[in-house]
Amino acid sequence: MRILLLGPPGGGKGTQSKFLMEKFNIPQISTGDMLRAHVKKNTELGKKAKEFMNKGELVTDSLILDMMEVRFKDNDCKNGYILDGFPRTFPQSEFLLTFLEQNKLSLDIIFDFKIDFRIVQERIMERSKLQKRSDDSIDVIKVRLDKYIQETYPVSQVFGSKFADKYKVIDASKQILEIQKELMKILKKVEN
Ligand code: AMP
């Protein structure tokens, strides 16, 4: 099962990824988590990525694509994955589509999480009290949402038209359990 999750930061993609990961026994590929791990380990990539992340800006495509090229080769990707936070730009979506085509693979479902940005801001501020993320401050959130509107939302539109039959809009303002149920209902149909 290859699942793509689209939607703004703070829209609940990470939470639903964890749920889907257990249900389908496939890894969550979160470029944000991968980058944070690099920052923590202070790798060369981590040092470069940190500057962008702290400002809420997108890390350069070449860094992301090099990282994903390696990640897709991992053994645990054989039976599928949940893409969470990737692709976020046109070059990243081109990379993904080419990679899938070259490997004769396709996406099974695309969930686009839609949510009011005011709710997103509130959620991210709540999260910042629980997890210490350096990019969860109000000013940085505004930049992250701007980047989403400018760079990532247009990518969602492309997926929406290219994969019209597999593209499902999810109301991400609902409760976590309600969203889980909705995702499962759709995925059951995909499996059959
Ligand atoms: P996230 O946890 O997905 O919200 O990502 C946190 C931060 O990591 C983002 O604000 C970006 O700075 C960076 N990041 C994560 N994924 C990507 C990506 N696919 N392309 C560019 N930057 C990314």
Image (tube, grey):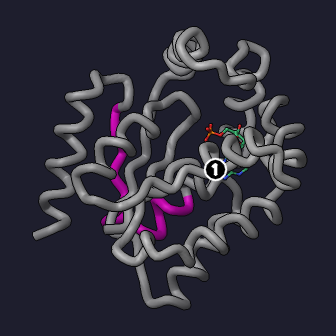
Ligand 1 found in image quarter: top right
Dot 1 amino acid type: Met
Considering the numbered disc 1 on the image, is that residue within a helix, a strand or a loop?
A: helix
Can you say which quadrant of the picture contains the N terminus? Answer: bottom left
Q: Residue at x 74, y 60 (%)?
A: 64
Q: Residue 111, can we see it?
A: yes
Q: Residue at x 56, y 78 (%)?
A: 73
Residue under circle 1? 34
Question: Does 161 appear in magenta?
Answer: yes
Question: How many numbered badges does the structure rendering display?
Answer: 1
Tell me: residue 182, above or below residue 93: above
**Left or right of residue 98: residue 90:** right
Question: Does 104 appear in magenta?
Answer: no
Which residues are the magenta region? 158-171
Residue most extreme to the left: 192
Can you say which quadrant of the picture contains the C terminus? Answer: bottom left
Residue most extreme to the front: 41
Q: Nearer the viewer, residue 19 or 174?
A: 19
Q: Residue 94, can we see it?
A: no
Q: Quadrant of residue 60?
A: bottom right
Find out if the beta carbon at label 1 lies less than 8 Å from the nearest ligand 1 atom.
yes
Residue 146 image point, x, y percent: 73, 32
Residue 10 image point, x, y percent: 53, 28
Tell me: residue 13, above or below residue 44: above
Q: Residue at x 35, y 39 (%)?
A: 16
**Left or right of residue 82: residue 189:** left
**Left or right of residue 153: residue 52:** right
Q: Residue at x 67, y 23 (%)?
A: 133
Residue 116 image point, x, y percent: 49, 22
Residue 30 image point, x, y percent: 55, 50
